[in-house]
Image (tube, helix red, strand yellow):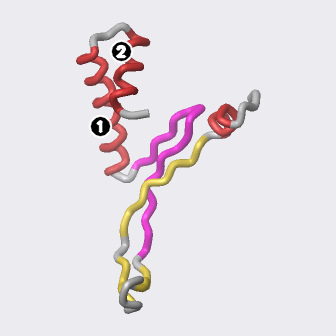
Amino acid sequence: MTKADLIESVYLTTGFSKKESAAIVEMVFDLMKNTLETGEKIKIAGFGNFVVKEKASRRGRNPQTGDEIEISARKILTFKPSQVLKASINGEDE
């Protein structure tokens, strides 16, 4: 599913215009992005959790030359699905 598919789904479900539907989807994505940028986690009941985690710097190896390199510290985004979502995907009744 793409962003365009989400916009189309909002358009068909809500009856808003395509332009309004696109604005709604963009606002939700912007809100999620801004929340995650500040380091807060997003919990959506029945769906899952989005969490930004810190990865420490570590030693790595350049696969072409075999030289050791330092991989810098960075932030990563993780998603953990809820039990309800897992059950739904697996066709189980919750």
SS for callout 2: helix
Q: Amino acid at mark 2?
A: Tyr
Q: Is residue 26 above or below residue 33?
A: above
* Tag shown at residue 77: none
Closer to viewer: mark 1 or mark 2 = 2
- Residue 37 placed where, x, y %? 32, 51
- Residue most extreme to the top: 15
Tell me: 92 left or right of 89.
right
Q: Which residue is mark 2?
A: 11
Picture residue at 31% right of the left edge, 23% below the top: 24
Q: Secondary structure at mark 1?
A: helix
Q: Nearer the viewer, residue 49 or 18?
A: 18
Q: Let me know if residue 68 is in the magenta part.
A: no
Q: Residues within 10 Å of mark 2 (few under 14, many from 20)?
A: some
Task: Please give the name of the residue rendered at 31% of the width and 19% of the height, measured from the top-left corner.
Answer: 21
What amino acid type should be assigned to the residue bearing mark 1?
Asp
Q: Which segment did they paint magenta?
A: 40-56
Q: Position of residue 49 (x, y in %)?
A: 52, 44
Graded by Cα atoms within 10 Å as few (under 14), some (14 to 19) or many (20 or more), the crowding at tag 1 reads few
SS majority, magenta: strand
Q: Quadrant of residue 27?
A: top left
Residue 20 point in image, percent of width and height: 26, 17
Residue receiving disc 1: 30
In the image, what residue occupies the spot 40% across and 12% down?
Answer: 12
Is residue 26 shown above or below 65?
A: above
